[in-house]
Image (cartoon, helix red, strand yellow):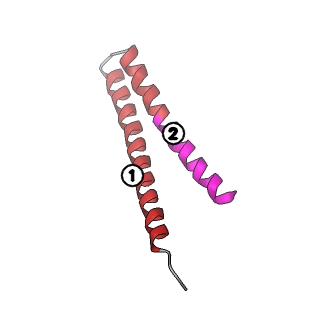
């Protein structure tokens, strides 16, 4: 049995980078929802609250798209 260490390292590096990116995106989504909630509690409305909610939803959508693409790669 021969192990291709370069390929193993490449897979490890890519999976680490994608994991950090997904966790970061999800965290930004949570922060966006928290900012939207804090703005609504203070009585603010308008652009900043809507932008925070839209940015949070965009982050969650990107996370869902990345997970769906990963499942597609595994199944296909």
Q: Identify the residue at horizontal 46%, vertical 58% (top origin).
A: 15
**Residues shaded magenta:** 59-76
Which residue matches tag 1? 20
Q: Residue furthest right?
A: 76
Left or right placement of residue 36 versus residue 15 in this view: left
Report the residue that reaches farthest toward the left.
42
Alpha-carbon neighbours of circle 1 within 10 Å: few (<14), some, or many (≥20)?
few
What residue do we see at 42% from left, 60% from top? Answer: 13
- In the picture of the structure, the residue carrying the numbered disc 2 is 62
N-term mark: 1 or 2: 1
Q: Is residue 66 magenta?
A: yes
**Quadrant of res 33:** top left
Q: Determine whether 30 is above or below 43 in the image.
A: below
Cα gap from disc 1 to disc 2, whole angstroms = 14 Å
> As displayed, is residue 45 above or below residue 22?
above
Is 5 or 15 nearer to us in this picture?
A: 5
* Residue drawn at x 38%, y 45% as measured from the top left: 24
Q: Report helix, strand or loop for mark 2.
A: helix
Image quadrant occupied by the C terminus: bottom right
């Amino acid at each position: 049995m021969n192990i291709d260490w370069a390929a193993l390292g490449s897979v490890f590096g890519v999976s680490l980078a994608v994991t950090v990116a997904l966790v970061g995106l999800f965290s930004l989504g949570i922060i966006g929802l928290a900012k939207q909630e804090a703005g609504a509690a203070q009585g603010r409305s308008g652009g900043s609250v809507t932008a925070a909610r839209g940015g949070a939803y965009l982050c969650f959508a990107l996370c869902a798209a990345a997970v769906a693409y990963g499942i597609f790669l595994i199944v296909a």
